[in-house]
Image (cartoon, helix red, strand yellow):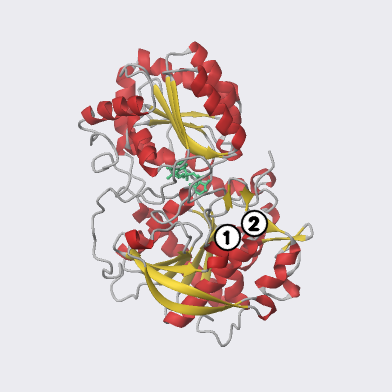
Amino acid sequence: MPRSKSRRGVVSRPAGKRPAQTGRKKTPAKKTPAAVAPVVAGKKGLNVLFVGSECATYAKSGGLGDVVAALPKALRRMGHDARIVIPLYRTIDRQRHGIVFDRSACVHMGGGEEQWVGVYSAKLDGEVPVWFVDCERFFGRGGIYDEPSGEYPDNAFRFALLSKAALQVCKDTGFVPDVMHAHDWPTALVPVFLKTWDRILSPLSNSASVLTIHNIGYQGKYHASAFPYIGVGYEHFTPNKFEDFGGINLLKAGVAFADMLTTVSPTHRSEILTPDGGMGLAPYLNARSGDLVGILNGADYEHWNPETDSYIAARYSAGDLGGKAKCKAELQRRLGLAVDPKIPLFGIVSRFAHQKGFGLLMEALPRALNSMVMQVAVLGMGDQGTEHFFHWLTAANPGRVGSYIGFSVELSHVIEAGSDFFLMPSLYEPCGLNQMYSMKYGTLPIVRAVGGLEDSVRNYNEWDGSGTGFKFQQPSGAALYDTMGWAVSTWFDRPQHIQRLRASAMAENFSWERAAREYVAVYEKAIANRKAG
Ligand code: ADP
Ligand code: GLC
């Protein structure tokens, strides 16, 4: 399957489907003072500006949005001044989120083009300052990157403008970041602009940059005709920077210009240095391997915690799983499944993308449904073939398969809480957040041992019942089928092991605090690299 150039995502209503949810705020978030003392006494906290195409609560298509929302919050709680810049997509409800007009800004693009934008602001979770870039021409649309009819053809222009606008916002507001933190191809031009834009005169001339690669499968490859709009000199249109088979590659340019590079798990760091895993970028990443760090994402337990989650039918904890049984019954009812606590229920919440291993699921699920006592609950959207497959599977297995094709933050929590097992047979998975959320909800992940799945899930040991989930290696439907069989037989034959696995999974702590500390070390290295270069 050809890999889409952009990340797939919508923030608004796909044709014929229920509206997407851009909000997740029903869980009452604990409020912590926005600015607390820096961790190291006497040492000034860092100014860090996140520039992203997604940020959960406002606009999200996947885990990138969760990370851009959660990491700045963790940094602020350590005493750093972390802020965020994202586009003001038309679908973001200004009133609901308390988003107010702040100023106008003039963004200078290539060819002497001056684009006036509106800059709006709000506080995420009451804590993190967010600036929104309003540009009707580019962001007044229903989707983040695309619509059901396809990817927006001007994405290079849209996100080049966002990246440049982020620098302009800093200049105009006087917020001088020690580090600008870019995420994936949409904001990979931030490091480029920092090093090429009137560097000497700019108040940002000492600002360092970090580029996090969340998903190397999406590189932002476009026709070279977008290059003049970006507005950097043709000396950078070379194969080790922008040029890619005659076109441009935004992620590759970011890799060349960023002061430090990260990806979202240690195992995935090794994977992207190989020809297969690097998806064309391995030589460039290897050239910078000393500046490339793998940091496992965290999970935001203020939003993903069965003890406080207000999306789910009943709250529960490791000590009292009574509520989980209610959540299972509620999920079974919601998706038209037979309401029966004894049948093992497998959940799926996912972008329908090749990466997620739907080829394996298409092979394994019909076979498993034929031979095992089980149910499946599915939430997702994206690839049309996969959407059709689940429509068919649901119709063919009444009471045993329930699906909702669309985007629903609420239902994603309901599935995490109500399922017994969670399927993530990814072909590659830079980190993966759903397996971490699943573990917190006592829902045992069934994962392929790649990337962050390998780093975050401990395999079940049949000897003593230790582990936190079920892992397999081979990217095949047969391997997935066997592992599902292993889970189902454990469910029926060794229920005491299921209890033990659940307890271990729920006790895992993938805190953002740990990740934030690792990012601060990376920021310091980026600042040092910037000074040296
Ligand atoms: P990726 O970023 O590759 O999509 P992750 O596991 O890191 O994978 O994160 C996926 C995030 O997107 C999770 O928060 C998950 O709940 C959410 N998500 C994915 N698909 C949907 C959907 N159809 N509706 C609601 N949330 C979804
Ligand atoms: C990406 C990856 C996913 C990761 C997420 C957040 O989209 O596919 O594995 O968890 O970004 O970093």
Numbered badge on residue 220: 2
Between 15 and 401, the residue placed more toward the observer is 15
Numbered badge on residue 186: 1
Q: Secondary structure at mark 2?
A: loop
Across and down, in percent, residue 216 comes to 60, 50
Q: Is residue 326 above or below residue 223?
A: above
Residue 259 in view here: no
Residue at left offset 48%, top offset 47%: 13
Residue at left offset 62%, top offset 68%: 257
The three-letter amino acid code for the residue at tag 1 is: Pro
Q: Is residue 466 above or below residue 429?
A: above
Are circles 2 and 1 on residues that touch, CB within 8 Å? yes
The three-letter amino acid code for the residue at tag 2 is: Gly
Across and down, in percent, residue 437 comes to 37, 40
Marks 2 and 1, the one that precedes in the sequence: 1
Residue at left offset 33%, top offset 40%: 508
Q: Which part of the image, by quadrant, shows the N terminus?
A: top right
